[in-house]
Amino acid sequence: SKATVSVLYWHTLKNLFKKKMSGDSFSELIKTEKEAADIIKAAKDARRQILKDSERALEREIEQYKIDEQNRIKSEQQESDANEGDVGKKDAAETERKIQEIKAQTDKNMDAMVKTLIDMVTVV
């Protein structure tokens, strides 16, 4: 963070000043500032790299999540399609059974219905 970089900067300057103020003050100051700037640049570069690495890792994680979700949805869809096929087969079998039942009842009652209709027509 900025606070950490600032603390690091001033701590480094303080230590460098203590070590180097014995000679030419101006050139030592310039040299010390350059060293501090290099340290800060290295810290910022390291932070930038950490952020880039984190972003790449997050992108990979998101991509893997997408793949996992697509596979889950595809699996559920296939399972649902298979279940619908079973239900359709059961419905078709049930319908065919009912049709056969109705045909059997019709055949069984046909003679009685024909006799009843003939009796009704001839009574009039």
Image: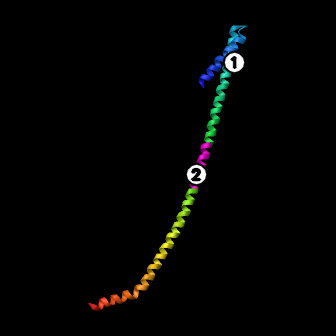
Q: Which residue is mark 2?
A: 70
Residue under the image location 62 percent in, 46 percent down = 64
Q: Tell me which amino acid carries mark 2.
A: Gln
Range of the magenta residues?
A: 61-74
- Asked if 27 appears above or below 114 in the picture, the reply is above
Q: Secondary structure at mark 2?
A: helix
Task: Write the residue at 59% across / 23% down.
Answer: 2
Can residue 92 be seen from the camera position used here? yes
Give coordinates of residue 21: x percent, y percent. Answer: 71, 9
What residue did someone put label 1 on? Answer: 35
Q: Amino acid at mark 1?
A: Glu
Location of residue 117 in the rendering, given as x and y in whole percent from the top left corner? 33, 87
Residue 82 percent across, percent down from the top left: 56, 63
Q: Say which of 103 and 12 sits in front.
A: 103
Apparent side of residue 36 relative to residue 72 in the rendered image (left or right):
right
- The image shows residue 50, relative to residue 90, as above or below, that is above
User: Residue 11, image x and y in percent?
Assistant: 66, 17
Main structural element of the magenta stretch: helix, strand or loop?
A: helix
Quadrant for residue 83, please give it. Answer: bottom right
Tell me how far mark 2 sits from mark 1, CA to CA: 52 Å
**Is residue 72 inside the magenta stretch?**
yes
| Disc with the residue nearer the chain's start (2 vs 1) | 1
